[in-house]
Image: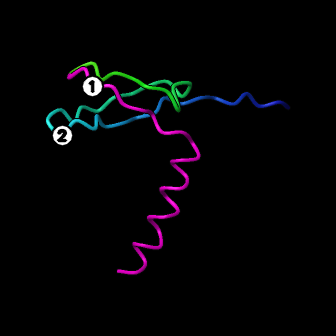
């Protein structure tokens, strides 16, 4: 049986400290710039590799504490 890979929307927080809106963007926008609908700030959606690297680097820091 072939399984279809379902793409889930990505949930992000606007990096603007005065906004901090929660945004959902399509998985296809990874690595592209998006604009916050509330404040208008442009920012880059992280790629899957960046997300994995961030989780790996955060784990050793948490263990050191």
The numbered disc on residue 58 is none
Residue lying at 59% horizontally and 46% vertically, measured from the top left:
49
**Element under label 1?**
loop
Quadrant hosting residue 62:
bottom left
Q: Camera-side residue: 13 or 1?
A: 13
User: Which residue of the protein is positioned furthest toward the bottom in this rendering?
Assistant: 64
Residue 18 drawn at (x, y percent): 14, 35
In the rendered image of this protein, does residue 59 appear above or below residue 51?
below
Q: Which residues are magenta?
A: 39-65
Query: Which one is earlier in the sequence, the residue at label 2 or at label 1?
Result: 2
Name the residue tied to disc 2: 17
Residue lying at 40% horizontally and 35% vertically, measured from the top left:
11
Q: Is residue 44 magenta?
A: yes
In the rendered image of this protein, does residue 37 appear above or below residue 3?
above
Residue lying at 49% horizontally and 24% vertically, measured from the top left:
26
**Element under label 2?**
loop
Q: CA distance from mark 2 to mark 1?
A: 11 Å
Q: Camera-side residue: 22 or 42?
A: 42
Quadrant hosting residue 44:
top left
What's the magenta bit mostly, secondary-structure-wise?
Answer: helix
Residue 46 drawn at (x, y percent): 48, 39
Side of 42 relative to 33 (left or right): left
Residue lying at 49% horizontally and 27% vertically, measured from the top left:
32
Q: Are marks 2 and 1 in contact (CB under 8 Å)?
A: no
Quadrant hosting residue 43:
top left
Location of the C terminus by quadrant is bottom left
Residue 31 drawn at (x, y percent): 52, 32
Location of the N terminus by quadrant is top right
Q: Is residue 41 magenta?
A: yes
User: Which residue of the protein is positioned furthest toward the left in this rendering?
Assistant: 18
Name the residue tied to disc 1: 41
């Amino acid at each position: 049986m072939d399984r279809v890979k379902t793409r889930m929307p990505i949930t992000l927080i606007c990096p603007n400290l005065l906004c901090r809106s929660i945004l959902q963007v399509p998985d296809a926008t990874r690595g592209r710039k998006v604009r916050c609908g509330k404040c208008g700030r442009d920012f880059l959606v992280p790629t899957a590799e960046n997300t994995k690297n961030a989780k790996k680097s955060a784990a050793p820091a948490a263990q050191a504490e």
